Amino acid sequence: MLIVFSFLFEFCFAQGDYSYSKAKEIENCYGIFQQYTDPVFPVYDESGDKDSQRRFINEMEVYAKNHPPCPVMQNTGNSEYDMEAWQNNVDNWFTQYRYFPRYIPYHLYNNKLTPQDDEKFFFAAVKLWIKKNPDLVESTPESE
């Protein structure tokens, strides 16, 4: 699965979307919780042929569409309502996606998003997942 991360990071880094240090930060974060990630996340075939690349890109697009980013709190001016609505959205998101978040390049499939949005979604999802799963976090080798 780390092959996928390497491919995505190399692809995005080559396009100037990410710094190497940010990519490493994301990759290192995954290593801790690898056992809790989604087993159906698209895996890049290292053979590197064009058909494999196209298949991976198509699978990633489908995955991104079926696994929306974590909810972001909206500001309507009513903080109590905003917090309640956001918490409901987060709860619904977790019922659909219980695995440790994967970095998904949503901006490649939605021109209204940027690589910075992808980072924001990812790190917010990680923070929410850790908060929701403290028992799993405590049981990882890194936390012992």
Image (cartoon, rainbow, N blue to C red):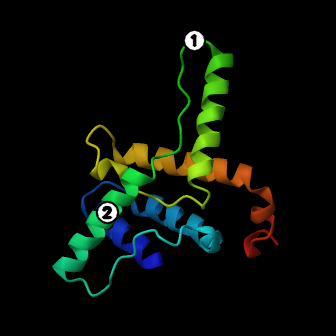
Q: Which residue is located at x 53 percent, y 35 percent?
A: 72
Q: Earlier in the sequence, mark 2 or mark 1?
A: 2
Task: Tell me where residue 127 appears, x and y as whole percent.
Answer: 64, 49
What is the C-alpha distance between the residues marked 2 and 1?
38 Å
Which element is circle 1 on?
Answer: loop
In front of the other: 78 or 94: 94
Residue 92 is left or right of residue 7, and the answer is: right
Residue 108 is left or right of residue 33, and the answer is: left
Provide the residue designation for mark 2.
Answer: 13
Q: Quadrant of residue 58?
A: bottom left
Report the disc number at residue 77. 1
Q: Is residue 74 above or below residue 121?
A: above
In front of the other: 122 or 57: 57
Residue type beneath disc 2: Phe
Q: Is residue 77 above or below residue 143?
A: above
Task: Tell me where residue 108 appears, x and y as whole percent.
Answer: 28, 52
Residue type beneath disc 1: Gly
Q: Nearer the viewer, mark 2 or mark 1?
A: 1
Q: Quadrant of the C terminus?
A: bottom right
Residue 69 is left or right of residue 136, and the answer is: left
Q: Quadrant of residue 76?
A: top right
Which element is circle 2 on?
Answer: helix
